[in-house]
Image (cartoon, rainbow, N blue to C red):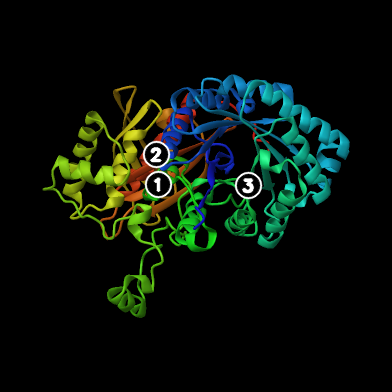
Amino acid sequence: MTSPRSIRIFDTTLRDGEQSPGASMNRTEKIEVAQALVQLGVDVIEAGFPIASPGDFESVRDIAGTVTGATVCGLARCNDADIDRAWEALQRAPHPRIHVFLATSTIHREFKLRMNEEEVLTRAVAGVARARSLCGDVEFSPEDAARTEIDFLCRVVEAVIAAGATTVNIPDTVGYATPLQMHRVIGALRNRVPNIDKAVISVHCHDDLGLAVANSLAAVEAGAGQVECTINGIGERAGNCSLEEVVMALKTRRDHYACDTRIDTRRLVPTSRLVANITGIQVPRNKAIVGRNAFAHEAGIHQDGMLKERSTYEIMRPEDVGLERTDLVLGKHSGRAALADRAKALGYQLDAEQLQTVFERFKVLADRKKEIYDGDVAALCEQQFASLPEQYVYDGYTLTSASGATPTVTLRVLKDGDPAAVTITAGDGPVDGIFLAIEKLTGMTTVCRDFRVQAVTVGKDAQGEVTVELEHAGQVQRGRGVSTDSLEAAAKAFLAAVNRLALGASPRLHPQKG
């Protein structure tokens, strides 16, 4: 029997995924996600685009210097400045990779680059050669490959492999391809490029038509050896190929694809939750693999079938992706050991100090709720990974309000550790009143661009999670707050965003690629 092919998983959550509007991460958050990706078992982590901003450079450099267990990759355009900056950021990595790209399709050549085929070919070869002179692992992407003439695509791929590319990535940059087309493109490269065996064929698909996973799987069927994807499928526009979906498709249908990956699938749900909480982009309930309803059965016929034989309506086991069959319900009499065990099972590695803080907050929450679910524990743990210093810390509020009346809000905070309070009668409701009180207390005028509320768990005493986006002086920052009191959650979220705005953020440049 032929051994299964090993498919490399190239995760670009920290680069392409971060290009989702509102999904920017700071350096500490990026390192936390990178470490989670190593635990997940990804082969390559694309840590960022070093020349885009000082912050991106520092993030890639820090990940390269601290994260082990996966290849660390940095993106660069085909010019010397980009490539040299990428290498400067990557050179401390045990296994670095420079990823260079250049558009090749007719529409990009004509309208964006204003270059002919020979000029594009020359620039691509020069970029790969420059990168290879610095780093032994070089990936090349012909941007918009899915809309590039196949003859020219084959010429480019052959030339960059000859120049030293060890991986050639075929991006469906605008999500235009279909599975049959992607299969034919990969097949053509394998059949027509004489030195194709000297490089790994990769594929990077966007989800504009909802076909990113299907196109990636078609490429694997045709012989691709690497799939580029993101956690929860986040990314430009409609997003990228979802890591959890493509990995579980390969695992569940191993009989068809005859492929394996290094992914520890039990880490999929914890990693999904981590990325969702850090980016503020929540996973839809009906999201495949990691959505809240992915393993839920309500229909009577389905429930009857499940009770008789689980495989009647489940093609995967929830345990295999990191879900428990049922929530472990904790209460106010539960001890520190039970909480630590539940946190670990949910994917949170807490040190003694963090566990003590979580336990103290757990006890407070347990007095307010009869039952504490996995989502509650996850929310408590997430608060321990706040990565920015807080100038303003929520300390409580008093509210007088009635339908149709202007609310009066007294907000209490700790400002740099000292108590501070403000009372204001303004706004067209309690949330607006709290928002205006925070503006008065902090002296920072902001525009609320997004305000979302969702339940963390179930029941009338569920914790509410509020996510906001505030704009100030051209910056947009996100804040998140969790509490059984939705107004308290809103106050915490507003203050979290204000703290980020107070620290400032460097501008970002995100060129669209692959």
In the image, residue 202 lies at what x, y percent? 63, 45
Number of other residues with Cα within 10 Å of mark 3, as a class: few under 14, some 14 to 19, many 20 or more: many
- Give the residue type that dot 3 points to: His
Total number of numbered discs in the rendering: 3
Residue 475 in the figure: left or right of residue 84: left
Cα separation, mark 1 vs mark 2, equals: 8 Å
- Give the residue type that dot 2 points to: Gln
Q: Earlier in the sequence, mark 1 or mark 3?
A: 3
Q: Are marks 2 and 3 in contact (CB under 8 Å)?
A: no
Q: Are marks 1 and 2 in contact (CB under 8 Å)?
A: yes
Residue at screen point 19% across, 37% down: 360
Compared with 109, 65 (above or below) is above
- Quadrant into which the C terminus falls: top right
In the image, residue 153 lies at what x, y percent? 78, 45
Q: Is residue 152 visible?
A: yes
Residue at screen point 40% across, 56% down: 404
Residue 142 in the figure: left or right of residue 218: right
- Mark 2 secondary-structure assignment: helix
In the image, residue 239 lies at what x, y percent? 58, 50
- Mark 1 secondary-structure assignment: loop
Residue placed under numbered mark 2 in the picture: 39
Residue placed under numbered mark 3 in the picture: 204
- Give the residue type that dot 1 points to: Asp
Q: Are marks 1 and 3 in contact (CB under 8 Å)?
A: no
- Checking the image for residue 264, the label placed there is 1
Q: Earlier in the sequence, mark 2 or mark 3?
A: 2
